[in-house]
Amino acid sequence: MSRPATTSDSRLRATVIGLGQVGSRFDEETGRKVIWSHVGAYLALAARVALAGAVEIDPTNAAAFRVRCPDVPIHTDIGRMIAECRPQIASICTPAENHAEVLFRLLECEELRLIWCEKPLSSRLDEAQRMVEACRARGVKLMVSYNRHWLPVWRTAQTRISGGAVGALRSVRVAFPNRLFSVGSHAIDLALVLGGPVETVLPMRLPGLEETGEPAVAALLRYVSGAAGIIQVTGLSRQLMVEAEAIGDIGRLYAREDHGTVTIECFEPSQAYAGYRQLGAPRVEQTNDTTFSAFVAMAENAVSTITRDAALACDGAHALEVQRVLELMAAAKA
């Protein structure tokens, strides 16, 4: 049973603001095999983290949390939570348009060491910049939940690309379903992870793929390195397809999130066309781990950043670059 932190508890005190899907309730889904929420991640690290309190104004979410964590107090006011819980880690799991307001309130807590914010950082770039600057001024770490920084398949893909497995990078294609803000922001993040900083963005709006009030936007990218990039919209959300391809002078890397596979094919002299090279036999690397939880990995990263000064896999500076590209894509006209 989870218990709130006490004055003699040496564990880091954590709180969660927003107990909806990503805050806690994704873990209630039938068939969910791994932890997929902030609350679940903190509970999984109970030896190092004490879930000291939460903030929620929705009665249904609060009731579900009381069943899960009957001894953890729920507040409706952030100031009251700060006074009673004195968190060292705080998760922001509210809608993006509320992230800034919540973050600035949390920075009033003197004990606060790290904020773990859901993505996107904000609904506006200028606001996101103020959030990052405020955290830097207060000496509070800021981690943002672009979870593919922690997923093994994408960590492996990025390591292979940066290690020269495909040679000098010439093009990157990232494919995700529609919904620019809730899903497309992940596509932008992954495009940056695999290809590096982006210099130019040419967006194209796809009205026929719009869904749930969010635009669908594809884009051509030019990376600072000179490589080309494509953010591909694969279709409607129910056709869940997430993959990426990186092509360089040595060969091609192709990664599929659902299978957890990273496939590398190297160029060989063509048997059909003199003077040309074609891709040879694929080498497949399996990264799937059915017990792996990106949320637990994120929580572990947060804890190690506080206790051992480890680097954050996704910090505020990276989230700002995602936000910049996101705003350029959102400006695309139908």
Image (cartoon, helix red, strand yellow):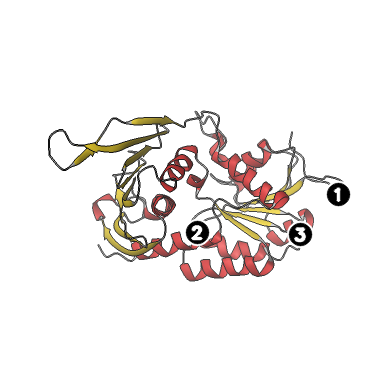
Q: Give the quarter of the figure containing the N terminus.
A: top right
Give the answer, above or below, for where 163 lies relative to 196: above
Residue at image point 57% right, 66% down: 132
What type is the residue that disc 2 sits on?
Ala
Give the residue at x 40% y 61%: 326
Q: Mark 2 points at which residue?
A: 319
Amino acid on which disc 3 is placed: Glu
Residue occupying image coordinates x 47% and y 67%: 125
- Can residue 24 be seen? no
The amino acid at mark 1 is: Thr
Count neighbours of disc 3 (C-alpha within 10 A) and say few if under 14, some if 14 to 19, many if 20 or more.
some
Instruction: Give how far across and how far down residue 66 sits, in percent.
Output: 68, 40
State the separation of the CA atoms marked 3 and 2: 24 Å
Q: Which of marks 1 and 2 is nearer the N terminus?
A: 1
**Marking on residue 111:** 3
Label 1 CA crowd tier, 10 Å (few <14, some 14–19, many 20+): few
Q: Which of 56 and 321 is in front in this view?
A: 321
- The answer to whether residue 330 is above or below residue 229 is below
Q: Quadrant of residue 261?
A: top left
Answer with left or right where residue 131 lies relative to residue 320. Answer: right
Distance between the Cα atoms at labels 1 and 2? 35 Å
Looking at the rendered structure, which numbered label has been put on residue 7?
A: 1
Q: Can residue 8 be seen in this view?
A: yes
Q: Which of marks 3 and 2 is in front?
A: 2
State the separation of the CA atoms marked 3 and 1: 13 Å
